[in-house]
Amino acid sequence: MSVFKPARRWQPAFYPFKKEKFSSRLLARIELAVKGPVFGCRMCGNCLLQETAFICPMECPKGLRNGPCGGVTREGNCYIDETRKCIWHAIYSKAKKKGREELLLEVLPPLDWNKTGTETWGDVIRQIRVTGTARFVKSLFSKDKKHKKEVWDSVFKTIRQPGWWNGDSRYHAPSYSEPASLLEKRLKAGEFVVATEVTPPLSAKSAKLIREIELVKPWVTAINFTDSSSANPKMSSMAGCKVAHDLDAEAVLQITARDTSRTGLQSMVTGCGQFGVKNILCITGDSPKAGPSPRGSMNFVDLDSVQMLWILRRMRDEGIYLDGRKIKYPPMFFLGAATSPMVQDPELQAIRDHKKVNSGAQFLQTNLIFEPDRLESWLEQMDKRNILDKVFILAGVTPLKSYKIAKFLHEKVPGVFLPDNVLKRMENAGDGEAEEGLTISLEIIDSLKNKKGINGIHLMTLGWEEIVKRIVTESGLNPPSSLRE
Ligand code: SF4
């Protein structure tokens, strides 16, 4: 926030990894003394304030540097600490008020850990000198917005966008033409696609996993394997993909920012083709707050999902690692991301999704949809941004097996809201609650089928895999005979 806020979320500052010169240490102390109370600065050493409406994004409990996660509550609060506003919600709202929301499209880099805890003011002063002190001071009073932006970018963009990152606000079309996967092929062919997800088991035996894959395989195009959902350790998503590949099923590898470092991410995807992985979904991941105790770090400061997309797209299309080394034979995959179109102002959500598409997302999987009509305003915003023809959207649908599950989703799962009429129908259904849940999902699918911009559905069955066959056949989606090739 740009004013002193005693109730703000104070977080410990970072400390440098090596002993700096006395003058740098002194400057860092002064910077923290000023920016701490005013912005809640943690001395990340890679300042983004210019881009984030002068609200420090490091106040986000997950440490996200490119926008909010999907867990913002309807009131715009953070789901990790519901007593506080989502800091990214505040950044978007302030940027919108000032007419600067397009600035939020720029893909911002992860921390350079060599710089954490060190001052950034020294860099700013050095860069002002390079630009020309008189020119910079003059620009402060200039009414020519273009000139002002040019001068400010020559100072601040140079600092926030180091050469190894080069983030921008543009769309980068994939560099290949032949589909990387069956999922991409079918979406490009205009099929209304059905995907689903299977949660890998808690144990090391794959018998249950195999049974579940066999159950859904004939009815869907692709199967996501969740990556320790709700921050509960389980068999890995990669293991799920390998088992699916061996069974001739198309897999989607989920990678959460929560459990991923930049080194781990790059080595994992370089080798993922060896396990038959052709689709990758980059997500932020649930906070360890949702998982068992003792809890791991709630800060996901090494990477966020937008940064993961940017790194993977560049590895595939430009054949480079984050550090700039060339990849002789780059990995190939169809890239996806998640979105929560129902949680916040659709206009703000569309900015976040636009950024994901620019970073590399070729398909988006939405959070659970229970009010298909409310999706319209988000789709309109996406359309206004001209991105509906650049990304395929799979709408998330869950068949409710019981009233208990419906209540649990509504009350406990971040970013999921069930309208009163759905909760009432489930409550009143008594012994027929599973059938009522199926009827509700068929009605939702029916209204999603013909919506402009929706290219398929993503069934999240929550362990009710047997229902996939009935949903696909009773909703009149692709007949099974056309599903396998
Ligand atoms: S972005 Fe980093 S340097 Fe800038 S105010 Fe926030 S923590 Fe401090």
Image (spheres, rainbow, N blue to C red):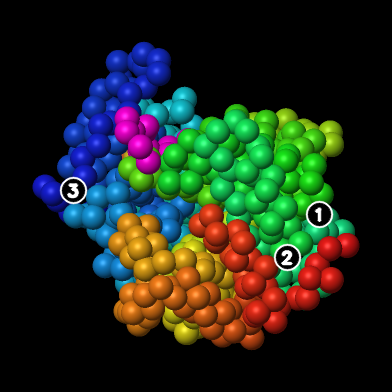
Magenta-drawn stretch, dominant element (helix, strand or loop):
loop
Residue ID at (81%, 49%):
248
Could you tell me how far apart the alpha carbons at marks 1 and 2 are, in whole angstroms? 21 Å
Q: Tag 1 or tag 3, which sits nearer the N-term?
A: 3
Compared to 208, does 387 lie above or below? Answer: below
Disc 3 secondary structure class? loop
Q: Tag 3 or tag 2, which sits nearer the N-term?
A: 3
Q: Is residue 300 inside the magenta stretch? A: yes
**Residues tagged 2 and 3 counted as in contact (Cβ below 8 A):** no
Kindly identify which numbered label has been placed on residue 455: none
Disc 2 marks which residue?
219
* Identity of the residue furthest to the left in this view: 6
Q: Amino acid at mark 3?
A: Arg
Q: Is residue 440 inside the magenta stretch? A: no
Kindly identify which numbered label has been placed on residue 8: 3
Q: Amino acid at mark 1?
A: Ala
Residue ID at (38%, 78%):
429
Q: Position of residue 326 (x, y in %)?
A: 77, 33
Question: Could you tell whether 232 is left or right of 316 in the image?
Answer: left
Q: Pick the quarter of the image with the C terminus.
A: bottom right
Could you tell me how far apart the alpha carbons at marks 3 and 1 are, in whole angstroms? 46 Å
Question: Could you tell whether 451 is left or right of 242 in the image?
Answer: left
Q: Position of residue 402 (x, y in %)?
A: 41, 66
Could you tell me how far apart the alpha carbons at marks 2 and 3 are, in whole angstroms? 50 Å
Q: Amino acid at mark 2?
A: Trp
Residue 145 visible? The answer is: no
Q: Disc 2 vs disc 3: which is toward the camera?
A: 2
Picture quadrant of residue 410: bottom left
Disc 1 marks which residue?
180
